[in-house]
Image (cartoon, rainbow, N blue to C red):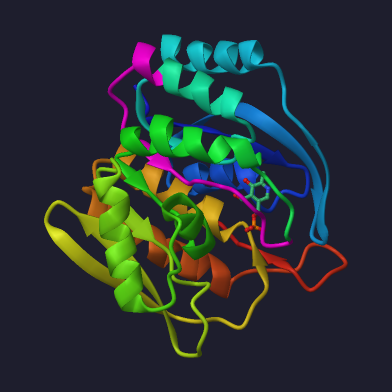
Amino acid sequence: MKTSALTIAGSDSGGGAGIQADLKTFAAHRVHGLSALAALTAQHTRGVTAVHVPDVAFLRAQVEACFDDFDIRAVKLGMLATAEVIDTVAQLFDANPGAPVVLDPVMVATSGAKLLADDALDAMRTRLLTRAAIATPNLPEAELLLGTRIDSVEAMQAAAQALRERGANAVLLKGGHLLGGGDVVDVFADAQGLHEIVHPRLALEAHGTGCTLASAIAARIALGDGLLDACVAASDYVHRALVGAYRPGRSEVVVLDHF
Ligand code: PLP
């Protein structure tokens, strides 16, 4: 049976982020991609113009259909939009335990659009962080989850450990938002300790990097990698996809070349 990975996330009509990025990433890793749409966005390279959250009964039907038939080796979580959706996803994991969960705690798009309701933050902390084999927040997301400022690599290391203490098995804290030139440092933390993953910063306004990184980690886990190896490989994949990135719309924003 072909190895499968499932993404439960939001659709990006502009094809750069969300489910569309996840499925391209799975395909590039030769993993069969399953998807359950938790939210739909009307979106282009300049921003999000509308959001629709389908009934949770329909989300449940999509996820149950996937668990009923496929050999799911990893699940990626992206935009979940509301506390009710988060709660439904947590219940689905209770009923279908086993597959490692990569949690991208999506909150706000680079364009500034809000992708998670304010009152859903607590559900993200208590219902999903505790189930994550690995969580992949960016700095603003980690700041909101922890209620602290993160303004240096040392603060990132403390924050990554703090997110583990709140229940995540491992954390990849993405440092792209840290100001200052030079390299981008991501901090990985698991029970063995801390590890830095470093890449040169590219001068691009890119869309969909967070989704792509999390789904590449899920693909690598599905293929048998350990968590740190999966993060190193996924981060190289995103870097390569950024080097080949192209501009699909009228703005300067680029999307990744997955292949
Ligand atoms: N749209 C959807 C459906 C997403 O899931 C995300 C991020 O996870 C975005 C948009 C925002 O992507 P970016 O911040 O890379 O522009």
Within the magenta stretch, is there residue 8? Answer: no
Q: Nearer the viewer, residue 238 or 119?
A: 119
Question: Please, what is the dominant secondary structure of the magenta stretch?
Answer: loop
Residue 11 falls in image quadrant: top right
Is residue 191 shown above or below 112? above
Horizontally, residue 60 falls left or right of residue 58, namely left
Please report the residue visible at 32 percent of the width from the left and 35 percent of the height from the top. Answer: 130
Q: Nearer the viewer, residue 245 or 57?
A: 57
Q: Is residue 15 visible?
A: yes
Q: Residue furthest left?
A: 192
Q: Nearer the viewer, residue 224 or 185?
A: 185
Residue 25: x and y in percent read 51, 48
Q: Which residues are magenta?
A: 93-111
Quadrant where the image shows the N terminus: top left
Residue 92: x and y in percent read 44, 16
Quadrant where the image shows the C terminus: bottom right
Q: Residue furthest front?
A: 147
